[in-house]
């Protein structure tokens, strides 16, 4: 299972990435395995206790969960190394960058992981450039299909 934040590629430049574990409640992992995750407006933040929290990540309630179900948009703790957290904190505070979840996946051992990226927001002209590149790539792919 691999769920990507496609909008983040369009909105941000990625500088650095970290793989983090995520603290989940019982039915959340089942919803993630079904692919019911939305990254809309989600971000991570380092708090005063040097803990990283993921905000606004929407994991839909599990359909068969009854009263044991979880809150859809609660903040979730990310599990990272202390050195990584210290580095994240200094970059976000000093340089004005943000932490964005790039993708959620389940690794070989069955654990849910989140790929967090240190990101800098794109300007309008940068977004236009990336749209133009995407359009050129599509045209080239179409041409190569017809001439093969």
Image (cartoon, helix red, strand yellow):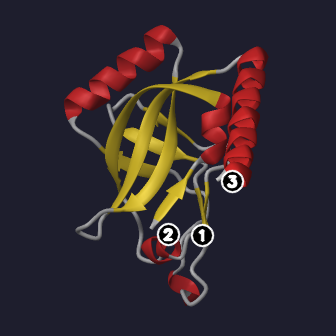
Residue 145's tag is 3
Relative to 112, 53 lies left or right: right
| Foreground disc of the pair 3, 1 | 3
Q: Is residue 95 above or below residue 61?
A: above
Q: Quadrant of residue 26?
A: bottom left
Relative to 53, 134 lies left or right: right
**Residue that protrudes farthest toward the top in the picture:** 94
* Residue at the (54%, 86%) spot, across then down: 65
- Of mark 2 and mark 3, the one earlier in the sequence is 2
Residue 32's tag is 2
* Residue at the (61%, 85%) spot, across then down: 63
Q: Quadrant of residue 19?
A: top left
| Foreground disc of the pair 2, 3 | 3
Q: Residues within 10 Å of mark 3 (few under 14, many from 20)?
A: few
Observer-nearest residue: 110 or 27?
110
Q: From the image, which quarter does the N terminus lie in?
A: bottom left
Residue that label 1 marks: 36
Check disc 1 and report its element: helix, strand or loop. loop
Position in image of residue 39 (x %, y %) = 61, 51
């Amino acid at each position: 299972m691999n769920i990507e934040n496609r909008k983040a590629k369009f909105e941000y430049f990625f500088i650095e990435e970290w793989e983090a574990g995520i603290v989940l409640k019982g039915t959340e992992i089942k919803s993630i395995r079904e692919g019911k995750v939305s990254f809309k407006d989600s971000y991570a933040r380092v708090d005063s206790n040097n803990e990283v929290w993921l905000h606004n990540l929407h994991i839909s309630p599990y359909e068969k969960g009854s009263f044991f179900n979880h809150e859809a948009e609660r903040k979730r703790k990310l599990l990272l190394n202390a050195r990584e957290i210290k580095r994240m904190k200094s970059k976000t505070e000093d340089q004005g960058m943000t932490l964005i979840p790039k993708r959620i996946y389940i690794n070989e051992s069955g654990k849910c992981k989140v790929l967090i990226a240190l990101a800098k927001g794109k300007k309008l002209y940068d977004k236009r450039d990336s749209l133009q590149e995407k359009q050129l790539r599509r045209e080239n792919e179409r041409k190569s299909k017809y001439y093969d």
